[in-house]
């Protein structure tokens, strides 16, 4: 009766056909339904996994079309509807029921329980799902999916339900191709944990099969289910051992390559433990060295001292070196300077410098290091020019005890006054 919920408008939007009831025949309490013929045939999972990319695209597009159907289709038909948390809780209840049989290997119970308790894994947007999709309900003709059958478990739930049969095939390239085309065709964004949940649901289907076999009292089915569960547990045990061995080898490699105590890591490499003694990144035991490593990086950060806004030029020294000339570059040699009396005087405007130079009457040399001349020197040095009152290299510089031309002019002007 579920097929009656698919209106002609919905059927027209689907890229495949659905069974249609052509008539009903009643015989006593039994009803026999006659369906219209659907083109295509079923194929084994091995045949499907070896198909072309065109058929993988058809399967992906068909799955996307099912999951994008309006949820009102299910709600109006009063069919089951589960939120993400309700679906997870339902699986936890089924796990408890399977555990009571005492026939589920411990490694599988622990594996499934941890996965179901991982809340982040079960954050998905519920959608319309087929609920019982597998190769026997998929009709194919050439490289085209012609129809989907078996809609008795239609509901709103986890889209990973319809991928469990694909993941169980263990054909990664085939599953990857279907998932890629499915993601491209869906109107809603597929969550990143879809295949992980599909793998878990494929494993958990064996436990559900065991519970059904025990409930039916079918010894042969029960033995088959137990054999499949044991095979799965053995495979997971081997895989877990291989993963543990790989993690140990990675940890040993990391420990062997760690710097010894008291050494500094190479330039550009982060300090061992991220600045903490003997530890790698949080939650990453494989990256932790075998022994504590003492970091030589200081606990404080050193910042560069900002460059001053003015240029500072050393004052010519006193004594025997006072009369030596200043090189043409504008700065004395290191041996000719003294920083004891170093001070910074804000530069004066050029007009004020000229008035100061013309008004001097003390007879001092223009290069004697007074405050006006030093200020001018600092200003000119900062702009790449020559010091105020100093002659050019062609004119020479004042010698010790002799006033410069500017000094003479100042003396004569004083005498006239």
Image (cartoon, grey):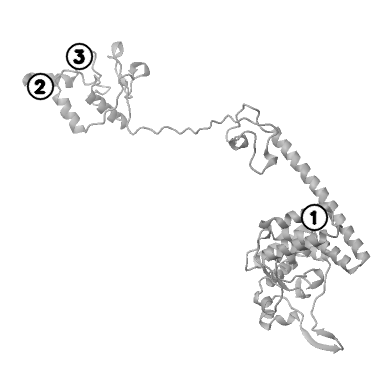
Numbered label attached to residue 413: 2
Q: Does 333 sit above or below residue 220?
A: above
Task: Count residues near mark 1 (Cα–Cα under 10 Å), then give few for <14, some for 14-19, many for 20+.
Answer: some
Quarter of the image with the C terminus in it: top left
Q: Position of residue 127 (x, y in %)?
A: 67, 69
User: Residue at the top extreme?
Assistant: 320
Q: Position of residue 179 (x, y in %)?
A: 70, 62
CA distance for labels 1 and 3: 105 Å
Quadrant location, the N terminus = bottom right
Q: Earlier in the sequence, mark 2 or mark 3?
A: 3
- Seen as rendered, the residue at the extreme left is 417
Number of numbered labels in the structure image: 3
Q: Give the class, few, some or many, for how many residues have Cα within 10 Å of label 3's Cα (few <14, many ≥20).
A: few
**SS for dot 3:** loop
Quarter occupied by residue 247: top right
Can residue 125 be seen in the rendering of this structure?
yes
The residue lying at 72 percent from left, 60 percent from top is 197
From the viewer's perspective, is 193 left or right of 344? Answer: right
**Residue situated in front as seen by the camera: 193 or 253:** 193
Compare residues 77 and 256 and report the one nearer the observer.
77
Judged from the image, the secondary structure of the residue bearing numbered disc 2 is helix
For the point 78% across and 84% down, the residue is: 21
Say whether disc 1 or disc 3 marks the residue closer to the N-terminus.
Answer: 1
Q: CA distance from mark 2 to mark 3?
A: 17 Å
Q: Is residue 36 above or below residue 184?
A: below
The image shows residue 60 at horizontal and vertical percentages of 71, 67
Residue count near mark 2 (Cα–Cα under 10 Å), binned few <14, some 14–19, many ≥20: some
Do tag 2 and tag 1 residues touch (Cβ < 8 Å)? no
In the rendered structure, find residue 402 and report the number of the disc placed on it. 3
Q: Residue at x 68, y 33 (%)?
A: 257
Residue 109: assigned label: 1
In this view, the residue farthest toward the right is 220
């Amino acid at each position: 009766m579920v097929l009656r919920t698919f209106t002609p408008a919905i059927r027209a939007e689907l890229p495949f056909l659905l069974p249609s009831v052509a008539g009903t025949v009643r015989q006593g309490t039994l009803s026999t339904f006659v369906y219209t013929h659907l083109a295509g045939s079923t194929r084994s999972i091995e045949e499907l996994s070896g198909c072309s990319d065109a058929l993988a695209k058809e399967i992906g597009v068909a799955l996307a079309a099912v999951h994008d159907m309006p949820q009102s289709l299910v709600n109006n038909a009063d069919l089951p509807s589960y939120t993400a948390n309700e679906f997870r809780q339902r699986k936890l209840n089924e796990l408890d029921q399977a555990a009571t049989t005492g026939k589920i290997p411990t490694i599988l119970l622990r594996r499934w329980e941890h996965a179901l308790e991982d809340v982040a894994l079960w954050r998905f947007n519920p959608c319309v799902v087929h609920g019982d999709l597998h190769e026997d309900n998929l009709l194919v003709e050439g490289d085209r999916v012609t129809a989907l059958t078996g809609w008795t478990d239609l509901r709103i739930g986890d889209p990973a339900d319809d991928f469990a049969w694909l993941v169980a095939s263990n054909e990664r390239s085939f599953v990857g191709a279907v998932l890629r085309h499915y993601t491209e065709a869906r109107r809603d964004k597929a969550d990143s944990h879809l295949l992980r949940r599909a793998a878990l649901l494929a494993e958990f289907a064996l436990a559900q099969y065991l519970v059904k076999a025990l409930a039916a009292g079918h010894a042969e089915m029960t033995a088959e289910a137990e054999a499949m569960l044991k095979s799965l547990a053995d495979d997971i045990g081997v895989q877990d051992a291989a993963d543990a061995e790989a993690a140990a080898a990675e940890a040993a490699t990391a420990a062997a390559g760690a710097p010894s105590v008291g050494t500094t890591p190479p330039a550009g490499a982060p300090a061992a433990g991220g600045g903490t003694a003997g530890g790698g990144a949080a939650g990453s035991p494989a990256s932790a060295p075998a022994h504590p490593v003492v970091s030589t990086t200081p606990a404080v950060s050193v910042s560069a001292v900002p460059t001053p806004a003015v240029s500072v030029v050393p004052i010519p020294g006193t004594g025997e070196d006072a009369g030596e000339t200043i090189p043409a570059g504008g700065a004395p040699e290191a041996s000719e300077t003294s920083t004891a009396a170093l001070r910074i005087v804000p530069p004066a405007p050029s007009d004020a410098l000229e008035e100061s130079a013309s008004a001097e009457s003390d007879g001092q040399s223009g290069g004697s290091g007074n405050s006006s001349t030093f200020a001018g020197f600092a200003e000119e040095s900062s702009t790449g020019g020559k010091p105020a009152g100093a002659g050019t290299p062609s004119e020479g510089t004042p010698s010790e005890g002799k006033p410069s031309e500017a000094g003479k002019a100042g003396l004569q002007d004083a005498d006239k006054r």
